[in-house]
Structures are given as structure tokens and as C-alpha cells.
Image (spheres, rainbow, N blue to C red):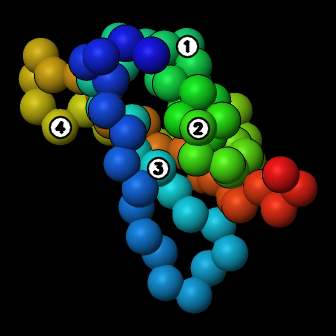
Amino acid sequence: MNPTVKISEVEIENQMLEKIRITGATDHTEALEAAEEWCDENNCILVTKEFENPVRELENTSTIFFAKVAADDYD
């Protein structure tokens, strides 16, 4: 994973799915690769390969991607 890409968990109470936030990715493809790698390392599955509402906080900054993940109970 690109060392500039950071992933953090977004906690959501009373929901089966959790979200992760991906920052520092230059595009959708890099964000997707980072999310898949993160899920492999953290025993979860990426629920969808489409990101929810990517946002750009400030002009000339990277986009923040949000992805849904779920626990992988089969490992």
C-alpha cells in the first residue's frame, strides 16, 4: 500500500456494517487497492467496490473515500 494512503475506522453504533475512511489516495483505483489490502490484514470484507460520497475537504487536497466493510466470520 502506498505509504501516503491512510485508513481509519469509522464507528457507527447499532449497525452491522462499519465504515473505513481512506485518505491520501490519488484516485479511486488506489483507494480501492488500499481498502482491499486493509481488509485482508484486518480480517474483514469490503462490502462494495464503490465508494460512498467521496469528498474533497479543501481545494488542492486529496479526496476522502468512505467504504463499507463487514466482519469476515469465515477465517
The residue at which mark 3 appears reads as 20
First-in-chain label (3 vs 2) = 3
**Image point 40% across, 61% down: which residue?**
10
The residue at which mark 4 appears reads as 57
Observer-nearest residue: 70 or 26? Answer: 70
Measured in 3D between alpha carbons, the distance from the residue under mark 3 to the one under mark 2, in whole angstroms, is 14 Å
Query: Residue 29 — which label?
Result: 1
Q: Amino acid at mark 3?
A: Ile
Measured in 3D between alpha carbons, the distance from the residue under mark 4 to the one under mark 2, in whole angstroms, is 28 Å
Count neighbours of disc 2 (C-alpha within 10 A) and say few if under 14, some if 14 to 19, many if 20 or more: few
**Image point 82% across, 62% down: which residue?**
73
Query: Residue 41 — which label?
Result: 2
**Image point 63% across, 30% down: which residue?**
36
Tag 1 and tag 3, C-beta contact below 8 Å:
no
Query: Does residue 28 appear left or right of residue 61 in this picture?
Result: right
Front disc: 1 or 4: 1
